[in-house]
Image: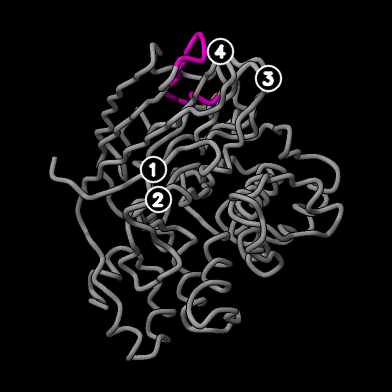
Amino acid sequence: MDRRHFLRFSGALCAATTALPQALRAQQAPVSAGWRSFELTTDIRVTDPGAHTRIWIPVPYATDTAYQRGAQTTWQVSGGGTAQLMRAPGYDVQMLAVQWPDAQAPRAVTMTSRFQTRNRRVDLTAPPSADAALETPAALREYLKPTALLPTDGIVKTTADQITRGHQGDVARARAIYEWVVENTCRTASTRGCGVGDVRYMLTANDLNGKCADINALFVALARAAGIPARDAYGLRVANSELGYKSLGKAGDVTKAQHCRAEFYASGYGWVPVDPADVRKVMLEEPPGELPLTDAKVRAARVMLFGAWEMNWVAYNHGHDVVLPGSAHDPVPFLMYPNGETAAGRLDSLDPDSFRYTLTAKPVSI
């Protein structure tokens, strides 16, 4: 690894990086310091015979951030369908909503989004700054509220209080929750998609297994229960990792590369990125597999992912209990996959082979 670039991206990694074997550091690629541009194409072919077909496709953040900007989305629809960009109420979830009035064939939509990303890091070793990006009180209250699958009372509140007891300040309490989640959860390869994120069930059943939408939802719910504003960030991996982690990236065909991350808000720092789920992913999937918490790769990921994100990933939204405009069905827990329905019922968003959709990502020059 080019250690200077790496430390500029994730300065909190110093101790963990020096613990890495020299051979491993030499094998890792340098980290991009500037903006990178990507094109993401979603291609959907509706083969279901049902009439009144509707499709909802998540799109990248409409608002620029310090780590993601310039999202531009275009689309083409065939088969007599219509499409428009829409927002769901509540968390400002943007999507492309497409509909066809009948079962004409072929029915298809191709959506293309272009955007730029750069690696993100909040230096938690520095003292809080009065110049940190501020969030409105109303927004912070929104990210303290419970959702259908992320309650903040009962066993969630009790667990959060036990974890954070004795820790002072939002950063220290959030770190205690992060470390607890890393140490007590387990990534389960057999979980469909990215999981569901039913936090009360996870704690009540002592079943802290799953994937990113389960593990990071657990962090978010516990943080909110502890009085720390927190939110999931739903998105998609769009490039291979430059940190040498085979498990933390995907390029080309990214149809099944959805990934949920998390953030918490700390006064003087703003929104702080975290990702305990990816620590567990490294443990399960990084060659040779089934790595212990003491492994050097795991230790490095664990330190980095409290305060930093490698932006080989695009963020869609922070939404929970998302109302799909025009849907005949209940809200979905989150919008990270293409969703669809016909008069016969909902299409299975976790089965792209049956739903007939593909997502493709590539670097571009903008």
171 sits left or right of 344 in the view = left
Between 131 and 247, the one lying in front of the other is 247
Q: Residue at x 25, y 36 (%)?
A: 114
Q: Earlier in the sequence, mark 1 or mark 2?
A: 2
Is 337 magenta? The answer is no
Q: Earlier in the sequence, mark 1 or mark 4?
A: 4
Q: CA distance from mark 1 to mark 2?
A: 5 Å
- Which is closer to the viewer, label 2 or label 4? 4
Image coords of residue 44 (percent x, y)? 42, 32
Instruction: Give me the disc on residue 52.
Output: 4
Q: Which residue is mark 3?
A: 329
- Three-letter code for the amino acid on which mark 3 is drawn: His
Q: Residue at x 70, y 49 (%)?
A: 222
Q: CA distance from mark 1 to mark 4?
A: 24 Å
- Three-letter code for the amino acid on which mark 2 is drawn: Val
Sort mark 2 into few (<14), some (14-19) or many (20+) by Cα contacts within 10 Å.
Answer: many
**Which SS class for mark 1?**
strand
Q: Residue at x 38, y 85 (%)?
A: 18
- Which is closer to the viewer, label 1 or label 4? 4
| The C terminus - image quarter | top left
Looking at the image, residue 336 lies above or below residue 142:
below
Furthest-bottom residue in this view: 22
Q: Earlier in the sequence, mark 2 or mark 4?
A: 4
Asked if the residue at tag 2 contacts the one at tag 1, i.e. Cβ–Cβ closer than 8 Å, the answer is: yes
Q: Which residue is mark 2?
A: 254
Magenta residue span? 91-104
Between 14 and 35, the one lying in front of the other is 35
Image coords of residue 295 (percent x, y)? 53, 84
Q: Which residue is mark 1?
A: 359
